Image: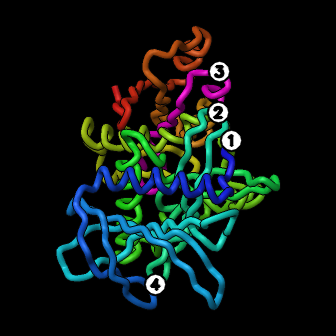
Amino acid sequence: MFSLIESKSEIEQAQKYLEATFNFGLEREVTRNIGYPGGTTRGDVRTDEKYWFYSNDFYNKKVKKSRRLNWLGKYKTTPGLNITVEINVPHEGRDDRVAGFFARHNITGEIYLFHSGRVGGGKRGVGKSAFIAWSNQRPIEAWDSKGKCREGLLVMPIKGEAALEAAIRYVDLIVAFKKAVRNGEMDTNEFKQRLYALESYYAESRGLRKGLRSAEFEYITRHADVVDALNTWRKENSKLPKDARITKNILIDLGVAIDQNLIEVYEVKMSTARQHIYAAIGQLMVHGKNPDCKRIIVLPEGKAIASDINDAFKRMNIDLKRFRLTSTSAVII
């Protein structure tokens, strides 16, 4: 469970840690023009000559809007920089008009930067639902002081060894999504089916705003790392059959499909607890319904599995893969 950070002093402190993370990881400071919808501003950005970060206070007297700007993008040597994503945060309280917010995990006490998932760009197909469906990101709930929920995508911890890498991964994800939009991927039948699956999934959960409850902290923060590693491992370790492609959506972590038929399906769980494995078996059997489909469960290294569950894997022809987590990455064993 996450709690929304609302007090002015706590938001200020979280913002200081966030800026310190970028200042440490992006060592150069340069003055550049930054383009945004409706104008251009000139300011000092932090950069490693691959990515850049800019932060400043913003206040509009006409509409009485106040926020802290957090802009991120890919660095270029051209005179002006373009914003990939704005993760601005309010100075105080809750403001759903602002795309970013800080939230604290109630068990660990760690603070994270979240993004609403609203992706701009001025092109048809660039938007929140399309981005979530394309990227397979899962919204997470944060609860405010009035007991109301705000959902968002977890971008990064505000400090720590893996913080900057998480931010860069999020920027790259949005860059790749916008490229996919330009290339017409949102118009394909495959993507329309993924979007339909997303909307159906959240309709069952009473709407997209409900998000995904953060019942297991490590699952939320590291699950995407494992799926990315699994994707890389599958591409590198075995040639895909003819006409096959790697696929994923809100319902499956990873699959290999020919046309619309899955010939391999993978389910990642961050725990070997019995209830999690039961859920994984159900997902594998539901989505790997073709008798010839290979069903693979992916579990953490070094965690014991009960003997009756191992027996069930054999009866159901479910293969087992293991993964190992480091402080900054995941490795498929």
- Give the mark nearest the N terminus, 4 or 1: 1
Q: Amino acid at mark 2?
A: Ile
Which residue bears the numbered disc 2? 107
Question: Distance of mark 2 from mark 4, alpha carbons?
Answer: 40 Å
Residue farthest left in this picture: 77
Expressed as whole percent of the image width and height from the top left, the position of residue 146 reads 82, 56
Expressed as whole percent of the image width and height from the top left, the position of residue 8 reads 64, 59
Tell me the mark number nearer the camera, choosing from 4 and 1: 1
Q: Residues within 10 Å of mark 1 (few under 14, many from 20)?
A: some
> Is residue 33 rendered to the left or right of residue 97?
left
How has the structure been colored for display?
A: rainbow
Badges 1 and 2: C-beta atoms under 8 Å apart? yes
Q: Amino acid at mark 1?
A: Met
Which residue bears the numbered disc 4? 122
- Give the mark nearest the N terminus, 2 or 4: 2
- Give the mark nearest the N terminus, 2 or 3: 2
- Give the mark nearest the N terminus, 3 or 4: 4
What residue is rendered at 48% in x and 39% in y?
Answer: 222
Name the image quarter holding residue 308.
top right
- In the displayed structure, 307 sits above or below 143; it is above
Q: Which of the numbered marks, if any, corresponds to residue 288?
A: none
Between 52 and 138, which is closer to the camera in this rendering?
52
Q: Which residues are magenta?
A: 256-279
Which residue bears the numbered disc 1? 1
Which residue bears the numbered disc 3? 274
Q: Amino acid at mark 4?
A: Gly
- Give the mark nearest the N terminus, 1 or 2: 1
* Residue 321 in sight in this render: yes
